[in-house]
Image: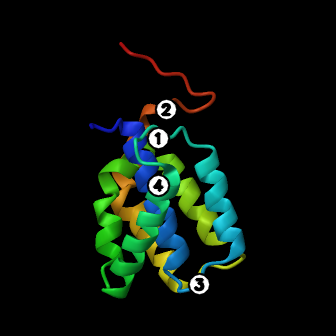
Amino acid sequence: MQLSSQQSFNQALIQLSVLLYQIDGKVTLTEQEYLDDVIDNMQWDSPISVEAFLTDAIYHTRKALDEGDGIELLKSLKEHLAYDADKAMEVAMQITGVDGERNEKETEILSLLSHKLLAKALVCKEALSPKPGVTQSFS
């Protein structure tokens, strides 16, 4: 079954969120509640239940982190996260800050996301959006 771009993004967003809340070696209740809220507000369109997907994402993320492949996992999500780069950055910022602190590893991931992996998608969308009060003329 071919997944829609939206569904691929949803899955990548869950994987990103799991990576970000596991990267510091501790999972807080506030991080888990935030992810649950993000998932509850998704339009899930997959034959795999969201609960099964989340369980699988947790397993694969933990394995990647244990093997030192967290950055590679993040890079593998790039294409799908670019579908809605603004939402991806919003969720990344929230999940890393919801527990009241961002550690060095979380900050490194956020920087990689915003400055390398999603930079083009974030800039392109911004360039295409007209600024309030600015008129565009096409001569």
Q: In terms of sequence position, does the residue under pointer 4 or pointer 3 come before the other? A: 4
Q: CA distance from mark 4 to mark 1?
A: 21 Å
Q: CA distance from mark 1 to mark 3?
A: 35 Å
Q: In terms of sequence position, does the residue under pointer 3 or pointer 2 come before the other? A: 3
Q: Front-most of 96 and 51?
A: 51
Q: Secondary structure at mark 3?
A: loop
Q: Is residue 132 above or below residue 78?
A: above
Q: Residue at x 41, y 65 (%)?
A: 56
Three-letter amino acid code of the residue under disc 3: Lys
Q: Which residue corresponds to mark 2? A: 129
Three-letter amino acid code of the residue under disc 2: Ser
Q: Front-most of 23 and 102?
A: 23
Q: Front-most of 107 and 23?
A: 23
Q: Front-most of 83 and 138?
A: 83
Q: Position of residue 101 (x, y in %)?
A: 67, 79
Q: Which residue corresponds to mark 4? A: 13
Q: CA distance from mark 2 to mark 4?
A: 23 Å
State the mark number for residue 26.
Answer: 3
State the mark number for residue 126.
Answer: 1
Three-letter amino acid code of the residue under disc 4: Leu
Q: Residue at x 44, y 62 (%)?
A: 15
Query: Is residue 5 rendered to the left or right of residue 103?
Result: left
Q: CA distance from mark 4 to mark 3?
A: 19 Å
